[in-house]
Amino acid sequence: MVSFIKKYILPKEIDFFDLLYKHSLIINQMSKNLNCCFLQEEQICCQKVMGDVELSKKMRKDNIKKLFSTFITPIDRESIYRVINELDWIAISINHFLIETQTYKINNLKEYQLLLNTLVEMSENILNSLKALKVKNNNEIIELCESIRVQYNQAVNFYIEYMYELSKNQNFNIVFLDKELLFQLRDIAKRFRVCSNYIEDIVAKMV
C-alpha cells in the first residue's frame, strides 16, 4: 500500500542536486576543452566546445521544465533556478569567447595560460561543490566556494597586470584585441564566482 501511494498518489520528487551536478560536468569539460584548444592548439577540442554548448542548452531546457512542473523541491525553486541559469551562462560565455577567437583567427593563447588554467580550476571547484551538495557536505562546499573566490581574485589580478603592460603598447589593433579577449575570460571567471555564491545560498537555506 505504501509503495502504491508513493508511486501513484504522492507527487514525484526529482533529485535536482544531481541534475545540477550533471550540468556542471558539461561545464567542466568545456573548460578543459577550451584550455586544450588554445594551449595545445587541438582543433578537435575547439569543436568539442561547440558540441558541449548544445548539451548545456539542452540540459538547461530540460532542468527548467522539470523544475517548473515538479511539486516537491529540496529548497525553494528560485535558488535552484539561479544555479541552473548561471551554469548555462558560463557555457554561453565560453561559447562567445570561442566565437570571437575564431572571428579573429586566433589559435594560440599561451600568454593567457595562467588565466585559462585558473578557469579549469574554478570549474573543478564548482563541480566538486555540487557533488558535495548531493551528500550535504556543507563544510566542503564552503571551502570550495572560498577557493573560487581566491581564484577569481587571481583572474582579476592577471587581467589588471596584463592590461597594465598592454597599455604601453602603441599598436592599437593589438591593444584592442587583447582587451576584448581578456575581458571575455574575466567574465567567465566572474560567472563561476557568481555560481559559487548561489551554491552557498542553497547551503544557507538547508542549514
Image (tube, helix red, strand yellow):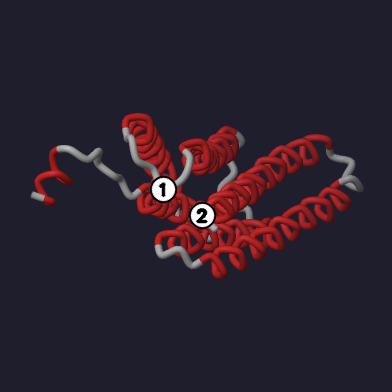
Residue lying furthest front in this view? Answer: 1
Amino acid of disc 2: Met
Res. 21 image quadrant: bottom left
Using the rendered view, name the quadrant where residue 69 is placed: top left
- From the top left corner, tell me how far across and down residue 41 is, in percent: 51, 55
Task: Say whether residue 98 is visible.
Answer: no
| Residue under pointer 1 | 74
Density class for disc 2 (Cα within 10 Å; few <14, some 14-19, many ≥20) is: few
Q: Is residue 183 left or right of residue 198?
A: right
Position of the C terminus, as image quadrant, is bottom right
Which one is nearer the viewer's eye here, 198 or 166? 198
Q: Residue at x 57, y 69 (%)?
A: 139
Of residues 172 and 138, the one nearer the viewer is 138
Mark 1 or mark 2, which has the lower sequence index?
1
Label 1 sits on what residue type?
Answer: Pro
Image x and y of residue 43, in percent: 44, 50
> In the depicted view, which residue is nearer to us: 136 or 145?
136
Q: Give the class, few, some or many, for how many residues have Cα within 10 Å of label 1's Cα (few <14, many ≥20).
A: some
Q: Position of residue 132 (x, y in %)?
A: 46, 64
For the question of whether residue 150 can be seen, the reply is yes
Q: Is residue 175 left or right of residue 15?
A: right
Local secondary structure at mark 1: loop
The residue at 41%/65% (across/down) is: 135
Numbered mark located on residue 206 in the image: 2
Q: Which mark is residue 155?
A: none
Q: CA distance from mark 1 to mark 2?
A: 8 Å
The residue depicted at 80 percent of the width and 57 percent of the height is 157
- Tags 1 and 2 touching, CB below 8 Å: yes
Left or right of 31 in this view: 68: left
The residue drawn where x is 77% and y is 57% is: 158
